[in-house]
Image: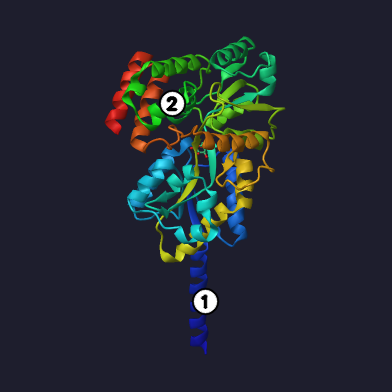
């Protein structure tokens, strides 16, 4: 009897252990700022409500460069997380290596093909198979302006480059730091996305999607570097290395006038209790209205042991639920990854993001963000980062920068 009890107890403990293993997800991500963490919490709570526990693997560093380095080490050690926040071409690279799982059954059952736009599916599928669950759609060609500072500086929202420069001069005259910026390669590149786009849709496509050497080294690109050099004159002395969310805080607190940043910045404003329209203004980078440079955060699902697969699939299913898509993206500052989610719960900036995205998608003016891994694989992206950052820091003039850019891209292709 005693022996029986002991065996039963052992069996029960083992079963509990298995059940626990099956109901846990280990998630690697770089959502560590206030707004990002608040959004991630929506996902954690959603899964906890379904009985799935969450093992957190945060790797700080906007844009995810550091997270991708840590991931490589984990996978090399044979210890892949269940799910990893990932952008664009990085997902396809991991798929090519055969490291990702398969979400086809759940995708078919839930009809993902019909509601997730093709622009995202290009990165959620490899060889016809679903490998990642898209969470959202962000875009990089935005301006975030402190409303009170704008009023002080004349109140006019800039609609073209000259008006933007005039506004930045007005901020300066008012003793307000014109541009809140963090000097990190990915942040420099994020501004570069918008500056290049402001010189034309075709130009953006030729330069960053087609990697056309003539576009990369031509006069328009020189103009783009000139504009970057001009913007560089409006940042404060302490910009070097500053994290993007601290730059957002400068605008939130009215210490700076504007930040050029993707709409994850809105997550910081919302977290700080600020309201669009009255406390801050969101608008497209002057000259880019009607066009969108997008990036989509997706959870790439790694090949894991069989006992972990059910929780992994439940996580993917939870992410694609319309209710979750609304709740999460309202907090994150992004648009839903599905086309059938109502914009009702979203603020005016969110509604605009959703509308702009749909319009750009139909009019052929939706482009993958170079800065956030949706235009090219990491090797090319990093080659561009390097030249953009050196130019922004005054190590290259515009003539030198265009030559270096074309050469660096050619070498990385
Ligand atoms: C982007 C990502 C966003 C946000 C941002 C800053 O690459 O898509 O979700 O996290 O980095 O960390």
Q: Secondary structure at mark 2?
A: helix
Which residue is the site of mark 2? 202
Determine the residue positioned at 57% across, 16% down.
164
Which residue is the site of mark 1? 12
Front residue of 352 and 255: 352
Q: Is residue 55 left or right of residue 355?
A: left
Q: How is the image coloured?
A: rainbow
Q: Is residue 146 above or below residue 263?
A: above
Q: Is residue 139 left or right of residue 253?
A: left
Q: Secondary structure at mark 1?
A: helix
Determine the residue positioned at 59% across, 22% down.
258
Name the residue at the top extreme: 173
Give how far across and how far down residue 218 sits, in percent: 35, 18
Q: Are marks 2 and 1 in contact (CB under 8 Å)?
A: no
Task: Tell me the quarter of the image containing the C terminus.
Answer: top left
Q: Is residue 212 above or below residue 219?
A: below
Give how far across and how far down residue 202 sits, in percent: 43, 26
Mark 2 or 1 closer to N-term? 1
Front residue of 174 and 326: 326
In the picture, residue 302 is in which quadrant? bottom left
Name the residue at the bottom extreme: 1
Q: Is residue 169 above or below residue 213?
A: above
> Which label number is shown at residue 146?
none
Determine the residue positioned at 49% across, 59% down.
108
- Rounded to the nearest angstrom, the CA distance separating label 2 from label 1 is 64 Å
Give how far across and how far down residue 88 sits, in percent: 43, 42
């Amino acid at each position: 009897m005693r022996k029986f009890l002991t065996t039963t107890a052992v069996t029960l403990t083992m079963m509990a252990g298995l059940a626990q293993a099956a109901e846990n997800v280990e998630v690697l991500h770089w959502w560590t700022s206030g707004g990002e963490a608040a959004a991630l919490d929506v996902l954690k709570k959603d899964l906890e409500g379904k009985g799935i526990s969450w093992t957190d693997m945060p790797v700080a560093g906007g844009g995810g460069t550091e997270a991708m380095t840590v991931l490589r080490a984990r996978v090399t050690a044979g210890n892949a997380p269940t799910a990893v926040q990932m952008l664009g071409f990085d997902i396809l690279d991991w798929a090519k290596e055969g490291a990702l799982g398969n979400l086809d059954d759940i995708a078919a059952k839930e009809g993902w093909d019909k509601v997730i736009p093709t622009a995202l599916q290009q990165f959620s599928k490899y060889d016809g198979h679903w490998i990642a669950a898209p969470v959202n759609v962000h875009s990089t060609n935005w301006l975030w302006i402190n409303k009170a500072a704008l009023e002080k500086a004349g109140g006019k929202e800039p609609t073209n480059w000259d008006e933007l420069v005039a506004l930045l001069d007005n901020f300066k005259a008012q003793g307000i730091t014109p541009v809140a910026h963090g000097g990190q390669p990915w942040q420099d590149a994020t501004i570069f996305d918008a500056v290049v786009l402001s010189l034309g849709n075709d130009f953006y496509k030729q330069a960053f999607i087609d990697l056309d050497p003539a576009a990369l080294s031509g006069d328009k690109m020189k103009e783009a570097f000139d504009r970057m050099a001009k913007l560089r004159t409006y940042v404060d002395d302490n910009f070097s290395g500053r994290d993007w969310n601290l730059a957002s805080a400068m605008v939130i607190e009215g210490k700076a006038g504007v930040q050029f940043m993707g709409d994850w910045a809105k997550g910081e404003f919302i977290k700080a209790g600020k309201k669009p329209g009255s406390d801050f203004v969101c608008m497209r980078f002057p000259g880019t209205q009607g066009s969108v440079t997008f990036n989509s955060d997706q959870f790439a699902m790694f090949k894991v042991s069989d006992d972990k697969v059910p929780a992994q699939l439940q996580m993917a299913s939870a992410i694609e639920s319309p209710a979750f898509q609304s709740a999460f993206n309202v907090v994150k500052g992004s648009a839903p990854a599905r086309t059938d989610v109502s914009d009702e719960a979203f603020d005016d900036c969110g509604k605009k993001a959703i509308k702009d995205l749909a319009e750009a998608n139909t009019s052929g003016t939706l482009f993958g963000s170079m800065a956030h891994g949706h235009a090219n694989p990491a090797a090319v992206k990093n080659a561009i980062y390097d030249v953009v950052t050196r130019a922004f820091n005054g190590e290259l003039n515009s003539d030198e920068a265009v030559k270096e850019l074309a050469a660096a891209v050619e070498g990385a292709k």
